[in-house]
Image (cartoon, grey):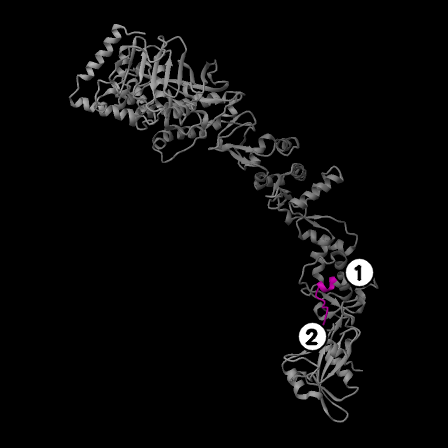
Amino acid sequence: MGHGNEARKVIEGVRREIEASKGTRIWGDYINALKLIAQVIFTRSSGFIFELIQNAEDAGLGLDNLGVFEILINHHRVKVVHNGRQFTSDDVKALCGIMSSKKPEKGTLGYLGIGFKSVFKITDCPEVYSGEFQFKFDRNHKEWGDPSHTPWHVLPILIDEPSENIDRDKTTFIIPFREETYYASLIEEVAKLRTELYLFLRWLRTIKVTDEVSRATWILENMGEDDEGTVTLKHDVQEQRFKFFRHTCPVPNWVKQDRLTQEYRANVTQREIAVAFAVDENGSLAPSLAGAMYGGVYSFLPLGEARSGAKFPIQADFLVQPGREAINYEASWNQWLMDEVAILCKEAIQYFKKHDTWKYQFLEAFGFTKTKGLESYDYLFGPRLIQPLEKYLEDDECVPTTDGGWTKPAKGVKLTEDQEASEALVSMGILTMNEIAVAFGGESDLKLVDLSVQESSTMPLKKVDRLDFLANEAFLSLKAKESNAPKWFWLLYMWLHTYPRWNYSKRGNRSQEGYWSYKIVLTSGANLLEGRDVWFPDFNPSDPILKDLTNTLQKSKQVLHPSIILNAKDEEEQKAIRGFLMGLTGMQALDSKTVCRDALLPKILTSSPKPLPNDLLKYTTYCQQILGNEIEKGLEFWVLTKQGDIRSAKETLLPKEYNPEQEWETHQQYVPGITFVSKDYLSGTTAIEELKRWREFLEAGGVKKNPDNGVEVFAENYAMDKLQSNYVNVTKVDKLNFGYDIRAETKNGEEVCFEVKGQSQDHDVELTGNELDSADIHKDFFYLCVISSVPESPSIYLVNNPSAPGVGKKDKLTIPLNVWKAAKWT
């Protein structure tokens, strides 16, 4: 491959022009500018790939062939080849300067003069082969001397023989690495190139990457656009599809007059914009932030740092920083383009609404990520793209409804009940399709959203379920006043029962969801109340007293509408709904226990007037038989006594007929004033279990097991009675705090003292305090008198001089059981 005379003349002419400024201030400024462009403007070491792709796209403008771009990499260099139009002299001059030869008014994209400088991030000696031109830029060229004082980046050097085989029909760039370490990082970067790279390129159709070290090759292909505007992109065997929307926009005068427009787009009269929406293999929209490279903003190729926040890539001829990292958010040109993109998106929305499948899916495509505080969002993407589109969607009827119509997002409700339960609402005749949204959503102008709708995560639809329905008291109250209300509410209960919902604990245990706090239970007065405030007559009393009390209670309580249960087709259905209402709404059963507890039990409590003896006996018997031990603690009954009078239960004990734990009646003379419950309650029964139930019931109502201080009183009175047979002047002195309870005289006139201790169960006896002192003082004239087995089988034991050595143990004086037992007195 040799040089043509014209090519040589161009290269040498460029050299002469630049070198003519040597020694001037321009020469030094040029050097500094080139260093800044090569090392600062371009931040990515792989950024030159994008620049060369864009240059290749421009080189294919107007060509009939399909563009192919190849990247070949080894340890030493990267080689880029494309089949676009070959270099002209203007292209060479642009490459050897810091200006662009591109003409945006004619459709070209990039800044050839500046973009190419990105190769200097990794190389000191790039080679260019295109048509008759073959030249390089070489930092280490022998003619430069000190390269840091030479604008070598733009001084072309003719190449006599290519450094490797070159296809003369294509444009080739050979870029030797400054350091071999660039190989690994560049392979890593190009591996990230995805098909979305050239979403918006028209001519370039194939990008082929070859790692000559591992011999791995991967190919990115644009398979073209079908009649519906869907482009297929292919990465080896994996395909991606995008639905495109494009619009050519005339440049308005206010944009043309802007200074940046005049500098960079002076003669441009119109520009094409585009947006693309990912489509999956099933033909469904598949919006995702991963559906575009980087932030999803393209100026023909993706921009590095510009992030729109949209789930679809955006293409426009944006004014960007050299290096393609960011967009100029203040430029009027860019603001106008973003306004036009928003308009194009609105057109896309209207297109989606007419599509049989996409009308259910497009809302999620317009769910945006908002990065407030980021200037590009605050000044460009937010106010000119996201906010206008969100406002448009809010105002537009863009949500498909179940009736085949449309509604605004704020007026659409999405039913989250499972499909079977939802369909049953209609099939059972509870609601029509048109009523569901109103009943569940609580507003008259709501519409039910089609179940196929995929909502936006950033503009969610109102979700409703059965709990919203049950909380709609206004709607349910209207239903309660209709003539068929019992039938309607029966159906509602059947629906809730047939299609239950479950709650799961952290351990995975399942429990059915209840409705205790919802006013959904229809009463006989056509009112709706929470279940706990409603009663269900659950028995037909044959006893006149219970029947009368039941009728009285029903007048004072809210009872379930009687016609509801009548709608059941059989006893099984009745049982199911009765169980549902009691178990999951809290409705209470008006049964014999309830009647007893609420109407009969109060009549026997001391908080009520004393009933007549026969009535008291009858009422108490009913309560005992029906309620048993299911009465609350702390109640106090009126009870009939053996004397035939009526007293508070706390003033009485159980007589021997009840087989109490301690039987006080046989020796009741030793506890004056105690009263016993009448045995008439028992009706002659002697059955052990029945006696036990009566004991528990009466004791729960306040009947005492033991009289107050009963053992102590019993013991003193019993001791007095027995001592009088052997002593005279037997007298109680327990109130005088002498340290003994009884004083007496022997028949010889000697005074003796008795300290009485009563016991129900045998155990050691202790003397303390003045009892111990008295024992020490009176010695042989002091007796410990123990009364055991109180009250059933009392016996008396006298221990003389308990403080004598070998009798009791001091500190406190403890008289062991075996000691006082050995002193039985007869």
- In reply to whether residue 550 is colored magenta, the answer given is no
Q: Nearer the viewer, residue 151 or 388?
A: 151
Q: Is residue 271 visible?
A: no
Q: Residue 339 carries which label?
A: none
Q: Which of 525 and 30 is in front in this view?
A: 30
Whether tag 2 and tag 1 are in contact, CB under 8 A, the answer is: no
Q: Which of 751 and 806 is in front in this view?
A: 806
- In reply to whether residue 709 is colored magenta, the answer given is yes
Q: Nearer the viewer, residue 227 or 342?
A: 227
When asked about the image quadrant of residue 426, the answer is top right
Q: Residue 149 appears at what percent x and percent y? A: 21, 24
Q: Residue 401 appears at what percent x and percent y? A: 54, 27
Q: Residue 588 appears at what percent x and percent y? A: 68, 49
Residue that lies at the very extreme toward the bottom in this rendered image? 748
Q: Residue 15 appears at what percent x and percent y? A: 22, 14
Q: Which mark is residue 690?
A: 1
Badge 2 marks a residue whose secondary structure is: loop
Q: In which quarter of the image is the C terminus?
A: bottom right
Earlier sequence position, callout 2 versus callout 1: 1
Badge 1 marks a residue whose secondary structure is: helix
- Residue drawn at (69%, 73%), measured in percent from left and top? 708
Q: Residues within 10 Å of mark 1 (few under 14, many from 20)?
A: some
Residue on which the image places disc 2: 709
In the image, the segment drawn in magenta is: 696-712
Q: Which residue type does callout 1 highlight?
A: Glu
Q: Quadrant of the N terminus?
A: top left
